[in-house]
Image (cartoon, grey):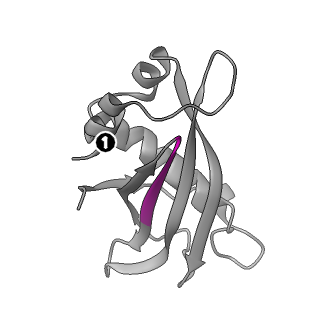
């Protein structure tokens, strides 16, 4: 199994919807913020460094199971784990956790497709990137 990395993310007032909890679209923002943070801290390669290699990631599939509402005063942790790499695609599992009680607010996975920044087309994930992410 690959490592699980964790980032603490702040909930902002504009994340709250008319039902007084975090709007479902904000969960994707939390995941994106966590991935940028975790690329630096966990994988020791910033997104800028990654892009300098001529690659980027685009989201192909998003699966989120919402389990509990998040509110403005909640502190949250976003945990992610590289699950698998298959050709140009990689699957990343995630959990969004309420920090105070360690209960899962949402969980799921995202399938990212690696693309060339030169032409925007999918490209097979190079072995050196697979090794860097398989920790």
The residue sitting at 45% across, 17% down in the picture is: 53
Q: Residue 13: image x %, image y %?
A: 63, 58
Could you say which quadrant of the image residue 100 lies in? bottom left
Q: Residue 77: image x %, image y %?
A: 37, 63
Element type where label 1 sits in the image = helix
The residue sitting at 38% across, 40% down in the picture is: 37
Name the residue that disc number 1 marks: 133
The magenta stretch spans residue 4: no
Q: Of 61 and 95, which appears nearest the observer?
A: 61
The magenta stretch spans residue 93: yes
The residue sitting at 57% across, 78% down in the picture is: 65
Residue 106 in view: yes
Q: Residue 95: image x %, image y %?
A: 42, 69
Could you say which quadrant of the image residue 104 lies in? bottom left
View extreme (right): residue? 18
Q: Of 86 and 46, which appears nearest the observer?
A: 86
Q: Residues within 10 Å of mark 1 (few under 14, many from 20)?
A: many
The chief SS type of the magenta part is strand
Region rendered in magenta: 88-94
Which image quarter holds the N terminus? bottom left
């Amino acid at each position: 199994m690959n490592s699980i990395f964790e980032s603490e993310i702040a909930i902002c007032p504009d994340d709250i919807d008319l039902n007084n909890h975090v709007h479902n679209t904000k969960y994707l923002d939390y995941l994106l913020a966590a991935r940028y943070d975790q690329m630096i801290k966990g994988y020791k390669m910033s997104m800028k460094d990654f892009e300098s290699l001529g690659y980027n990631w685009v989201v192909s599939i998003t699966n989120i199971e919402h389990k509990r509402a998040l509110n403005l005063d909640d502190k949250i942790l976003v945990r992610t784990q590289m699950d698998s790499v298959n050709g140009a695609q990689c699957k990343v599992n995630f959990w969004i956790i309420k920090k105070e009680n360690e209960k899962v607010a949402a969980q799921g996975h995202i399938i990212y497709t690696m693309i060339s920044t030169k032409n925007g087309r999918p490209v097979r994930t190079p072995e050196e990137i697979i090794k860097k992410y398989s920790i």
